[in-house]
Amino acid sequence: MEQTLFYIMATVIVIATIFAISEKHPVHAIVYLVTSFFALAVVFYLLAAPLIAMFEVIIYAGAVMVLFMFVIMMLDQGSPEDAERPPLMHYLPALVLTGITLVSLVLLLTNRSPVAAAAVAPRLVSVKEFAITLFNQYGVAIEIISMQLLFAIVGVLYLGRRRKP
């Protein structure tokens, strides 16, 4: 069952990511990307990494998507009054992919046997041990990621600045 859900979620990730890349409207692309992030969180949960699944939801689907929306607002692509409401067919792929993700997550949570969950139970790690491991082994990677986010914000501010005529 878990292997089937893994392949379903992998398919959802690939399709949602392709839609996110190929979508012309930036807000629709963000919706597809959020769908991809949630499906990836389910995959991490299936791989017995619930902490990384939570990080995926909190950091990427939450914080990074808010940053992307901020970038879209900063670029000011046009006024909302000029935009037309897209037809229902434009929402259909996102709704189908989100539905597949939610149904797979519900199936995973309802059909999980307690014996299998207890057999894979990891060792409990304290917050201090986690922080020491994170910043000793992965400190450079965290700093590189934070610099990338800083460069992205500076780039957005540069692109979004008002030019004098």
Image: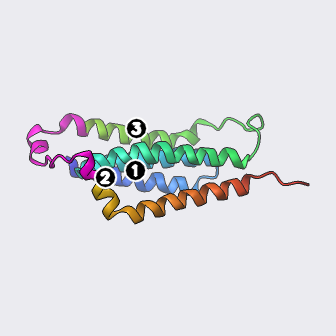
User: Which residue is more in the foreground, 147 or 88?
Assistant: 147
Labels 2, 1: front one: 2
Q: Residue at x 30, y 41 (%)?
A: 104
Q: Amino acid at mark 2?
A: Ala
- Magenta: main secondary structure: helix
Labels 2, 3: front one: 2
Determine whether 135 is above or below 61 in the image: below
Q: Residues within 10 Å of mark 3 (few under 14, many from 20)?
A: few
For marks 3 and 1 on the same chain, the one whose residue lies earlier in the sequence: 1
Q: Residue at x 44, y 41 (%)?
A: 96
Q: Split into 4 quadrants, where in the image is the C terminus?
A: bottom right
Is residue 105 shown to the viewer in this render?
yes
Q: Which residues are magenta?
A: 108-131
Q: How many marks?
A: 3
- Name the element at disc 1: helix
| 106 with respect to 161 (left or right) | left
Q: Which residue is mark 2?
A: 131
Q: Which residue is mark 1?
A: 12
